[in-house]
Amino acid sequence: MRLVLNKEAVTLEDMIPLAMLPVGDVGEIVEVLGDENDVKRMSELGLRKGSLVEVVQSGSPCIVRFGETKMCFRDSELLKIMVLSSSHAL
């Protein structure tokens, strides 16, 4: 499967769970997986396709920054958010 983000072709192999993004790295959200309610909740929080996120603290809980907001997540929530690492984002 190939996706086109920011005019670049992206394969499934390029995507990683947000939980695997190293501290200080920025990723672009490619997909939010899960049941409809979880995906809607993440979208309402501002975590949706195309959003940029930075990992501030890894582990559980994990702290991520997007825009001017910092949020704390459990590992299970982060595994549902697929990102492109900073080498592909932007």
Image (tube, rainbow, N blue to C red):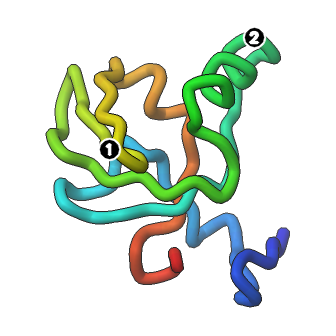
Task: Classify the position of the N terminus by image quarter.
Answer: bottom right
Q: Position of residue 83 (x, y in %)?
A: 53, 56
Is the residue 88 above or below the residue 45 in the image? below
Closer to viewer: mark 1 or mark 2 = 1
Tell me if 37 is positioned left or right of 24 in this view. right
Within 10 Å of disc 2 (Cα), the crowding (few <14, some 14-19, many 20+) is: few
Of all residues, the one furthest to the front in this rendering is 68
**Tag 1–tag 2 contact (CB < 8 Å):** no
Q: Residue at x 65, y 58 (%)?
A: 50
Disc on res. 65: 1
Please, what secondary structure does the residue beneath circle 1 have? strand
Rendered residue at 52%/66% (across/down): 84
- How far across and down, in percent of the image, does residue 4 sit? 80, 78
Please tell me whether residue 88 is drawn above or below residue 27 in the rendered image: below
Name which quarter of the figure residue 51 lies in.
bottom right
The residue that label 2 is drawn on is 37
Q: Amino acid at mark 1?
A: Arg
At label 2, the amino acid type is Asn
From the top left corner, tell me how far across and down residue 22 is, in percent: 23, 57
Distance, label 1 to label 2, CA atoms, is 22 Å
Q: Nearest the camera: 35 or 68?
A: 68
Question: In this rendering, would 13 be left or right of 85?
Answer: right
Query: Splitting the image into 4 quarters, where does residue 7 fall?
Result: bottom right
